[in-house]
Image: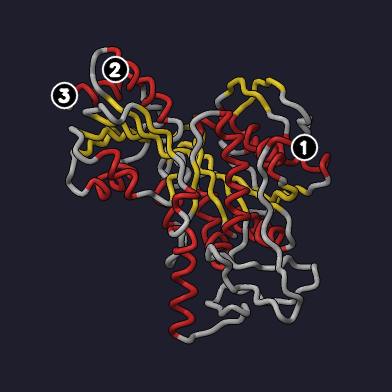
Amino acid sequence: MSEAPAANRVLMQGNEAIVEGALAAGMRFYAGYPITPSTEIAEQSAEKLPRVGGRFIQMEDEIASMAAVVGGALTGAKAMTATSGPGFSLKQENLGYAIHGEIPCVVVNVQRMGPSTGLPTSPAQGDMQQARFGSHGDYGVIALTPSSVEEAYYLTIRAFNLAEKYRTPVILLTDEIVGHLREPMTLPDRATLEIIDREKPMEPPGVHKPYQANAIGVPVVPNFGEGYRFHTTGLIHAEDGFSTSKPQVVDNAVRRLTTKITNNIDDIYQADIRDIEDADVVVFAYGGTARSAQRAVRMARKNGLKVGFYRPITIWPFHDEKVHQAIAGKKAVIVPELNLGQMAREVERVARGSTRVVPVTKVNGEILTPAEILAAIEGVY
């Protein structure tokens, strides 16, 4: 069933929930290439998009998939693609083009073990830094990471809303754990959802400047086919869309790609923060690993240990100020993750020596268990 006109209880896989969320947000174009463990997203999109007047296309590779999404989004369609592992690497050049051209779209990365082909069916969180720095140059990024099936649904909607509002690709950085997990959830009445559509020009063709920023630093770029003639390029461009090498214009253009994100961080950033106030130790975890971490925190508190829980839902932009406030002066911060410490390095940078940061890493293709995280908590007392 492609439409969910009223609230109903379902048993759903994380990857399926992403598709349902995308459809609820208004996705009408999907271009992709099947790759484990994200393939269900392509399969469900292929089945359900035609039922709502949308279009699905399987491209020859991940490079072309991202290019097609860019093209679809420029026509005004809400567009999405999904991938994993080496597919995310292949998307980076055209992802950078979309960031620079300020083209709204959603890119789902269901993380798996790497590097290279790695272990295609095993969970990992090794793309956390790639989500931020995968493309060359300076720019801002929005990346969201769910920890449950229900959250995968709602964060997909939020990803589309943020993409439309800030005219940027938004990365939904999930993992094999959440992608293949099945949980019960309630699909809401879509009429109750907040859905954001991109702003449209108020000035007539010939007067409107497609890359002139609005009040929050975001340009109002017309959709192709709606009467506006404008230029889109990967070159540094002025407000009219045409390339320029004037130093001040170049400087402003590049900085704005970052500041339109950083200046609006309080609108973009979300985190699940619990029991921080009285905590001696904080467990800082995200994505699928946060499920084990939350259980470990409950076990620790049951044993009389004062342990708090911090789960960033928005991992990029990283909210230095809020994270520092939450962890400064604590006995230790435990950072469990399925990589060799990519998030731990960010936490340590923000801690600025105010607390001890303890990475708990695993890269053997298996999940981190609550017992392993609990042992790390007990080890710092």
Say which of marks 3 and 1 sits in front. Answer: 3
Residue 354 occupies which quadrant of the picture? top left
Earlier residue among tags 1 and 2 = 1
Q: Is residue 76 left or right of residue 167?
A: right
Crowdedness of circle 2 by 10 Å Cα count: few (<14), some, many (20+)? some
Q: Above or below — where is 349 with respect to 281? A: below
Question: Residue 282, how many percent across, how many down?
Answer: 28, 31
Of the residues shown, which amino acid type is indicated by label 1? Glu
Q: Quadrant of the N terminus?
A: top right
Say which of marks 3 and 2 sits in front. Answer: 2
Residue in the picture at 46% in, 39% down: 313
Residue behind mark 1: 47
Viewer-closest of 275 and 379: 275
Residue in the picture at 57% in, 55% down: 169
Q: CA distance from mark 3 to mark 2?
A: 13 Å
Of the residues shown, which amino acid type is indicated by label 2? Arg
Q: Above or below — where is 147 with respect to 262? A: above
Residue behind mark 3: 381
Residue 156 occupies which quadrant of the picture? top right
Residue in the picture at 62% in, 49% down: 161
Viewer-closest of 186 and 93: 186
Numbered badge on residue 301 = 2
Q: CA distance from mark 1 to mark 2?
A: 46 Å
Q: Secondary structure at mark 3?
A: loop
Assess whether mark 1 and mark 3 are in contact (beta carbons under 8 angstroms): no
